[in-house]
């Protein structure tokens, strides 16, 4: 893990197994303890319908903003360590149930496309459960590299199935 100048990174959080509200709240607390990073702000929690297989529980989602001096790969390693501590299993059904999912949505203004990491997250523009909580904590006119302005992306999506909890 190398260090870089400080960067604001946005992290998507989601869970639908083993007390999902507690999973997300615990992960948010664990983000405050990340090495070389500080949690700036977190969104409300949202209950959302699953994408993909519908035979699974609803998700609890949130988005957090961190300031970090970790490079993107180093930050991803830290996020995956948190997932592992929550007994995240990566094998199995795509978009299937999970104890915890932490996605690196954005890393400053960077565009990264490697086998292990794509930033901005390639599906975020199509996911109300990401854009709605992101819009709570990020500037509404923020440009998401290669995707457009947050407000325009939000306008193009239905918020159906996304319920704010706290």
Image (tube, rainbow, N blue to C red):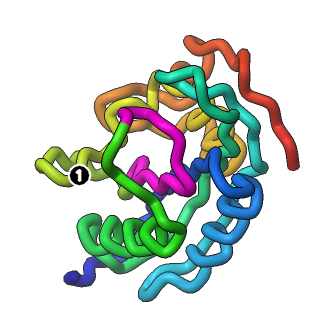
Badge 1 marks a residue whose secondary structure is: strand
Residue 93 position (above or below residue 33): above
Q: Which percent across, then down, holds residue 6? A: 39, 75
Left or right of 77, for residue 22: right
Residue drawn at the location 35% of the way across and 71% of the way down = 75
Q: Which percent across, then down, holds residue 158? A: 65, 13
Q: Quadrant of residue 25?
A: bottom right
Q: Is residue 118 magenta?
A: no
2 or 21: nearer the viewer: 21
Left or right of 107, for residue 2: left
Q: Quadrant of residue 157?
A: top right
Quarter holding the N terminus? bottom left
Q: Which percent across, then down, holds residue 14? A: 58, 48
Range drawn in magenta: 93-106
Left or right of 101, for residue 15: right
* Total marks placed: 1
Q: Residues within 10 Å of mark 1 (few under 14, many from 20)?
A: some
Residue 6 position (above or below residue 109): below
Q: Which percent across, then down, holds residue 26? A: 68, 71
Residue drawn at the location 18% of the way across and 53% of the way down = 116
Left or right of 117, for residue 83: right
Residue drawn at the location 75% of the way across and 40% of the way down = 46
Give the residue number, with chain letter if any, for mark 1: 117
């Amino acid at each position: 893990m190398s260090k870089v100048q400080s960067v604001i990174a946005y992290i998507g959080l989601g869970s639908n197994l083993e007390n999902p509200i507690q999973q997300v709240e615990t992960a948010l607390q664990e983000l405050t303890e990340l090495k070389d990073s500080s949690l700036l702000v977190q969104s409300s929690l949202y209950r959302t319908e699953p994408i993909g297989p519908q035979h699974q529980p609803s998700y609890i989602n949130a988005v957090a903003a961190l300031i970090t001096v970790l490079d993107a790969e180093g930050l991803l390693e830290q996020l995956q360590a948190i997932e592992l501590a929550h007994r995240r299993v990566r094998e199995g059904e795509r978009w299937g149930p999970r104890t915890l999912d932490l996605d690196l949505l954005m890393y400053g203004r960077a565009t990264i496309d490697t086998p292990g990491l794509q930033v901005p997250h390639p599906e975020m523009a199509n996911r109300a459960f990401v854009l709605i909580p992101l819009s709570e904590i990020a500037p509404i006119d923020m440009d998401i590299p290669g995707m457009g302005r947050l407000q325009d992306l939000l306008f193009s999506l239905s918020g159906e199935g996304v319920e704010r909890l706290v």
